[in-house]
Amino acid sequence: MKAPPRVRQSLFSLSLASSACVGIVLSLVIAPPAAHSYPAFQAFSEKHSGRTVNCSLCHINDNGPVGNEIGQIGSLTKDELARLNLARAAMAPGVNVDSPILNEFGNHIIKTVGRAKFLQMMADPAQLAPALGDKSDLDGDGIPDSREYLDGTDPLNKFHGDPWLLFVNNLSRNWPHVILAVIAVCLINYGLAHVIQGSSLLVKLRSGK
């Protein structure tokens, strides 16, 4: 027994609606999340320091998170997408973050201040430096990460920082070696001076004979 035309049309419409709903749900689940970049922090660091600062300040890729290259949204695997979503859900501070599009400094920022506060700071990126404090020094160069953010230098490169601060920090760390080197140079110069003086006297003695 066939269903009446109106009933069949209703069932067909219901089937189309169900398929559309399933398609929308699947697209939300399967499709990669939208990429977010935060140029306000980069712009502030550039303006404050006078240096050129690119996306590698916080991101793995120099060109930011948008694209299909390594460290960008389009290249992420299923497991990496899961890690990205967990990082984006870290709204409160203190959560261990391992975003596949952020470098160590970027993950450290989110862990320290939380994503909720980080998003609020977009209106005033200068707040990030005091929020990070002066304890963290990821590259071990003696310059706090917060200072490197203000200076526009790489917080993950111990050879990239304010030249004067690097000099002072290296001198304070290695002063015993510096003193020994100075003493060694003085002794060498003293010895050379006496060798030259002795050679000169020897030449005079020989010429006198």
Image: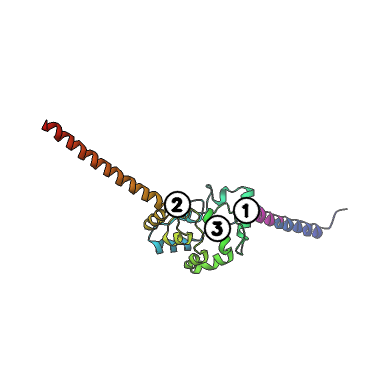
Q: Is residue 144 left or right of residue 30?
A: left
In the rendered structure, which amino acid carries the disc numbered 1? Arg
Q: Which SS class for mark 3?
A: helix
Crowd class of label 3 (few under 14; some 14 to 19; many from 20; radius 10 Å): many
Dot 1 and dot 3 residues touching (CB under 8 Å): no
Q: In terms of secondary structure, where does tag 1 sit?
A: helix
Residue 72 lies, in percent from the top left, at: 54, 51
Residue that label 3 marks = 108
Q: Which residue is mark 1?
A: 83
Q: Where's residue 156, x and y in %?
A: 48, 53
Q: Quadrant of residue 184?
A: top left
- Give 187 or 37, whichever is nearer the viewer: 187
Location of residue 120 (image quadrant):
bottom right
State the CA–CA distance, disc 3 to disc 2. Answer: 17 Å
| Magenta region, residue range | 22-29
Q: Secondary structure at mark 2?
A: loop
Q: Name the main secondary structure of what is drawn in magenta.
A: helix
Does 119 appear above or below 12? below
Residue bearing the label numbered 2: 158
Residue 31 in sight from this viewpoint: no
Three-letter code, disc 2: Lys
Q: Residue at x 45, y 56 (%)?
A: 142
Amino acid carrying label 3: it is His
Q: Residue at x 12, y 32 (%)?
A: 207
**Tag 1: Cα neighbours inside 10 Å, few (<14), some, or many (≥20)?**
some
- Is residue 152 in view from this perspective? yes
